[in-house]
Amino acid sequence: MPSKIITRSEKESPLVITESEFSPESIDIENRTVKTVFTTERKVLIDPWFDEPYYEILSTDPEHIRLERIDKGIPVLDGHDRSGSVLKQFGIAEGLDLGNENPETLMRFSRKEEALKAFQDIADGIVKTTSIGYRVYKYEDISEDDDKIRTLRAIDWEPFEISLVPIPADIDAQIRSNEPVVELKKPDNDTNNRDIQKGDPLMPKKLENKNPETEVEKVDVEQVRKEATEQERLRSSEIRALVSKVGLDSEIAEDLIKEGKSVEQARELIIDKVAERSEEKAPSTHTPRIEVDSDTNRNAKVEGAAEAILHRNGIVTELSDKGKMFRGFSFLDIAREFTPNFGRGLDRVEIAERALASSDFKAITDNVATKTLEKGYKAQKQTFWPFVKEGFLPDFREAKRVRYGEAPSLLEVKEGGEYKDASFGDKSEGVKLSKHGRVLKITEETILNSDFNVFEDLEMFGSASSRLESNLVYDVLTSNSKMSDGKDLFILNTNKAAASGIEAGLKKMFELFMMAKGMDDKDFLNLTPEYLMVGPDRREEAMKVLKQIVASKSSDVNIYSDELMPIVEPRLNGKGWFTATSKEQAKTIELNFLEGRRGPSVKSSFDGDRDLIKIKIKHIVSAKSINREGLFWNPGN
């Protein structure tokens, strides 16, 4: 199964956490550094709050990691505490060594009391795991068809911080050290903010006799302030996003931010708030995600729900603010949003019934269906457009198309003489539209089961509509149907030759093209074939005939190499070979649509007797040969 690429914008990419491990040669007591394996390609289960669980693999390919932050240095934190306080920062991790099987980084610890305590625990083998905070911007879906939980491989991700943690998600995420344990002395009570001096009990023993001048670190205050500001911004924006997603009052987010709650702490408190709200019965306790006190806001809500469904099915790559309000919603969640009082007092089936009958839900269906059908329609390859003319008809009545070359010749007008009337006669072709379609259904079961696959079926019907057009066009060629004069489209020695291979038959083909005349059998039409159409069975033969040859003598020159462009079409397999002029030279085949409706369309309607929405896919289109001049067929040998 081909992999699917899932792209996120920076606003849509939440900060994620995963565990990593220390390398064997980790500890350097003198410099307060330890090496850690940054990440491995272990598969870890991710269970996001607002989406379905999935397995995640972080790619260790250097091309897949955004290195700018780690190259400049990311903070080392205590348990992912991104409260914004620099006092919670133990140190800094700089650079990424990509030369090993798994990327490694060097963590350098501060001299402040809490940082040295943590470093001592590492030296004693008590703290054994690290964990990185990161964002993913692009996933590759590598799931197998029979996987119950999908697997996503992060192929564009960025680390923001690294932390010491007590409990890893990865069983291999352990601190490993082959250095001897070194004791760090317990600090005195008055050691805060002191200058580093010889004999300082906060320093490891190996550093006591060192020249203090060589040990004093120069702190980049501006860089620290910048990092702290960025961490605070991230913390605040994530808390606000969490509160917004569940429809709580924005004041709750501001309170959590002012109280200095971490994202993890805020998440737990928000869950409690949601639980409290769900237990209350009064309708007034439900805060809608988008207020619908005007038609404008109601339309925005409908558009947002449709966009979220399109995003879920891969039709839309980025969500607007309207769509983010519905991210992760089930079909039933969306239905509830468009039910009076948000479905208070109704069971699941009643919510589905009310939604199906609502004009809002029908508008969502039309929006999603139209864009999904359009994607499938545009994705399908069509090979006929170089020689087929596009046309439009106002209705289903038959219209006439004058055949090419059927205009009478211009006559000389003597001085003072009259211009004679011209008549085109009856030599015209009738064209008429035909209607094609299918019906899909959205039922109560569809909503209750959150079956979004119904819209994937629409994408396939979009592709089927495109294939229908190809079928109609190439059926004109292969069926050799009758034209208005009662004769076949292809007539022997007019625009058809005796069966032969391509190379052997090209001479006769060019002769018939260039000798074709108009209705009075006087004027040569002077048509030139431009396209050679074959099925896959004659592809190799066609390519050889049309291949350019660097000839050593004139008799070896391939005179057809610049004359024809090959078109390989599976619908012509086993049908011989065809040639055609461009549609600018002659209107040979016309593909007609209804005016104002190029391509398929969808329309939804509610069936109250069966409690379902019918999605009708309709494609009004037809193909007809207008001229036999400009087309040629050789049945092949």
Image (spheres, grey):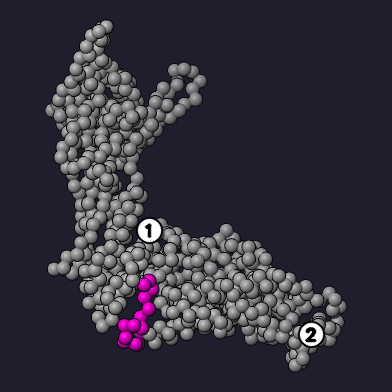
The C terminus: image quadrant: top left
Kind of residue at disc 1:
Ile
Q: Name the element at disc 1.
A: loop
Residue identified by numbered label 1: 315
Q: Residues within 10 Å of mark 2 (few under 14, many from 20)?
A: few
Q: Is residue 35 left or right of residue 349?
A: right
At x 50%, y 77%, the residue is: 239
The reply to whether residue 21 is in sight is no
Look at the magenta stretch and give its main secondary structure: loop
Q: Badge 1, how many Cα within 10 Å: few under 14, some, many 20+?
A: many
Horizontal relation, residue 141 to residue 380: left or right: right
Res 261 seen here: yes
Q: Position of residue 338 (x, y in %)?
A: 29, 72
Q: Which residue is painted at 17% across and 42% down in the image? A: 396
Going from N to C along the chain, the mark reached first, 1 or 2, is 2
Looking at the rendered structure, the secondary structure element under dot 2 is loop
In reply to whether residue 567 is colored magenta, the answer given is: no
Which residue position is annotated with label 2? 194
Q: Residue furthest top?
A: 415
Which span of residues is magenta-colored? 278-291
- Expressed as whole percent of the image width and height from the top left, the position of residue 461 reads 27, 54
Q: Position of residue 527 (x, y in %)?
A: 31, 22
Which residue in the rendered view is the most extreme toward the bottom? 189
Q: Quadrant of residue 362?
A: bottom left
289 drawn magenta: yes
Coordinates of residue 127 in the picture (x, y in percent): 63, 83
Q: Amino acid at mark 2?
A: Arg
Q: Residue at the spot x=34%, y=87% of the render?
A: 280
